[in-house]
Image: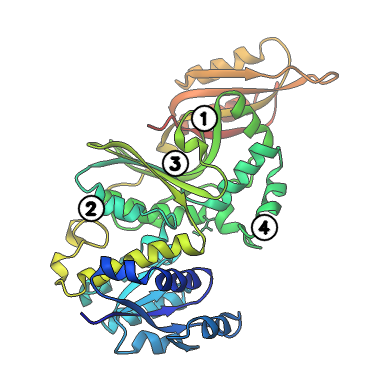
């Protein structure tokens, strides 16, 4: 059979990895795919040095500085978009689809924002858009959700899906560093970008959650409905107190099917330290999926990096080599469910979400303070699961108290917290962090 010809757009960290792994494992890959997979064109940029690198490394391919050439080249079967961003990457992908090419992309932001448009265009043209590398890097979570678990009604997913944030939280816990210090270390090691907003504010995780939710529940991509809260305001004190109570704090992407709809949220979360996922450290990712038939399953691995991400990209090439000649009705649907079977299920606002809560309050160390606080909690039907009070430092008359609640509705907890903060014995604002027992 003739080789599958790929045009690679972008020769950065991931592009370089795709080239290397494909060269190194060519013979194994061909035995699996049933035909050779060859990158015949590479488009890169002079400005960032990637063009020179590509020219030096990709000796058998045509290296160009104009991505449109690769997109429109009639000999190319698959366009692999590794440029990133939501502007020119979108244009190139839509152009490639319009020219009848299959597309592989690692671009989670693009799919989270424009997935509906891109998949509709691909459907109309009878081509495939594959995106295993867009979520959790090398972990084949898209394949697992779309195919391996397709007999299940997915009940919930909780994932550590941003390695940079996980590295920062691990460093804070292990070394007692502040958020700012741990971020600096992540930047020194090249894990965090100079502008870390996407990673530390939970936006990157929300992009990935949007994509997984669509596949897990058969719903349209709805990035704007994801509640997103990052880790920048977490303190080392909260990480230490959580640990004393037997919990770790992780930035989780959570989706859960409940009676009233679907919860979609990214936020720092206390999880019991005995859970496997609580022990995922550094830049590693993990995704916990609960299906009604299979029960809880856990997927662990590198969520970023050159060759781990290339592993996912090339797996998509292999799928394409295998299904290239299959007619569109016999392919695995992009979003796991048949395109006319996506359903509109309400996404709950964060005020309606049910969770456990960690509350930290700075209070005067005198009689009656706790009684006032627990009365307010009881008035809002909030039950206390655990409690921690630290002795006052000598000379101070204020102490930290930490309350863990049983599951409660967020709006009730917020209302109770406002009343508690209004007590004269309570100093400043309380800290609220959500808590999940997981499966
Ligand atoms: N910046 C991401 C992370 C990797 O830190 O996990 C790419 O999605």
The image's colouring method is rainbow
Q: Which mark is residue 207?
A: none
Disc 1 to disc 3, C-alpha distance = 25 Å
Q: Residue at x 46, y 75 (%)?
A: 87
- Identify the mark nearer the N-term, 2 or 1: 1
Q: Nearer the viewer, mark 2 or mark 3?
A: 2
| Ligand 1 closer than 8 Å to label 3 CB | no
Residue 345, image x, y percentages: 27, 48
Relative depth, front residue between 326 and 31: 31
Residue denoted by label 1: 273
Circle 2 crowding by C-alpha within 10 Å: few under 14, some 14–19, many from 20: few
Query: Contact, CB < 8 Å: mark 4 with mark 1?
Result: no
Disc 2 to disc 4, C-alpha distance = 41 Å
Q: Residue at x 35, y 52 (%)?
A: 141
Q: Nearer the viewer, mark 2 or mark 4?
A: 4
Element type at marker 3? helix
Q: Residue at x 52, y 86 (%)?
A: 55
Q: Residue at x 21, y 56 (%)?
A: 337
Image quadrant in which the N terminus is located: bottom left
- Identify the mark nearer the N-term, 2 or 3: 2
Residue denoted by label 3: 350
Image quadrant in which the C terminus is located: top left
Disc 2 to disc 1, C-alpha distance = 36 Å
Element type at marker 1? loop
Q: Which mark is residue 343?
A: 2
Circle 1 crowding by C-alpha within 10 Å: few under 14, some 14–19, many from 20: some
- Identify the mark nearer the N-term, 1 or 3: 1
Element type at marker 2? loop
Left-right relation of 147 to 435: left
């Amino acid at each position: 059979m003739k080789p599958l010809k790929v045009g690679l757009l972008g020769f950065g960290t991931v592009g370089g990895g795709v080239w290397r792994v494909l060269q190194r494992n060519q013979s194994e890959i061909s035995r699996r795919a049933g035909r050779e997979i060859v990158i015949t064109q590479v488009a890169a940029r002079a400005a960032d040095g990637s063009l020179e690198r590509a020219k030096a490394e990709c000796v058998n391919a045509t290296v160009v500085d104009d991505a449109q050439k690769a997109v429109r080249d009639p000999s190319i079967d698959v366009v692999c978009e590794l440029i990133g961003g939501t502007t020119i990457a979108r244009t190139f992908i839509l152009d490639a689809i319009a020219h009848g090419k299959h597309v592989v992309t690692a671009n989670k932001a693009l799919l989270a924002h424009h997935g509906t448009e891109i998949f509709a265009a691909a459907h109309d043209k009878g081509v495939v858009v594959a995106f295993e590398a867009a979520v959790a890097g090398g972990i084949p979570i898209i394949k697992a959700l779309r195919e391996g678990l397709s007999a299940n009604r997915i009940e919930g997913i909780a994932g550590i899906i941003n390695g940079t944030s996980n590295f920062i939280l691990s460093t804070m816990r292990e070394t007692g560093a502040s958020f700012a210090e741990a971020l600096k270390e992540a930047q020194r090691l090249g894990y965090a970008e100079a502008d870390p907003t996407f990673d530390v504010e939970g936006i990157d995780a929300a992009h990935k959650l949007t994509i997984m939710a669509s596949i897990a529940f058969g719903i349209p991509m709805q990035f704007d409905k994801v509640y997103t809260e990052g880790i920048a305001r977490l303190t080392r004190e909260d990480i230490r107190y959580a640990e004393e109570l037997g919990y770790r704090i992780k930035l989780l992407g959570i989706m859960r099917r409940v009676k009233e709809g679907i919860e979609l949220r990214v936020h720092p979360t206390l999880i019991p330290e005995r859970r496997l996922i609580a022990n995922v450290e550094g830049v590693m990712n993990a995704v916990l999926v609960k299906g009604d038939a299979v029960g809880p399953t856990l997927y662990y691995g590198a969520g970023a990096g050159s060759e781990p991400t290339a592993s996912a990209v090339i797996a998509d090439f292999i799928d394409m080599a295998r299904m290239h000649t299959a007619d569109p009705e016999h392919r695995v649907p992009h979003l796991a469910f048949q395109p006319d079977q996506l359903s509109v299920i309400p996404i709950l606002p964060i005020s309606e979400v049910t969770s456990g809560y960690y509350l930290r309050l700075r209070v005067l160390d005198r009689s009656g303070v706790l009684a006032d606080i627990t009365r307010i909690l009881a008035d809002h039907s909030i039950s206390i699961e655990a409690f921690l009070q630290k002795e006052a430092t000598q000379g101070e008359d204020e102490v930290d108290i930490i309350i863990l609640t049983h599951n409660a509705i967020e709006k009730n907890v917020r209302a109770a917290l406002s009343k508690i903060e209004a007590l004269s014995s309570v100093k400043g604002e309380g800290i609220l962090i959500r808590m999940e027992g997981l499966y």
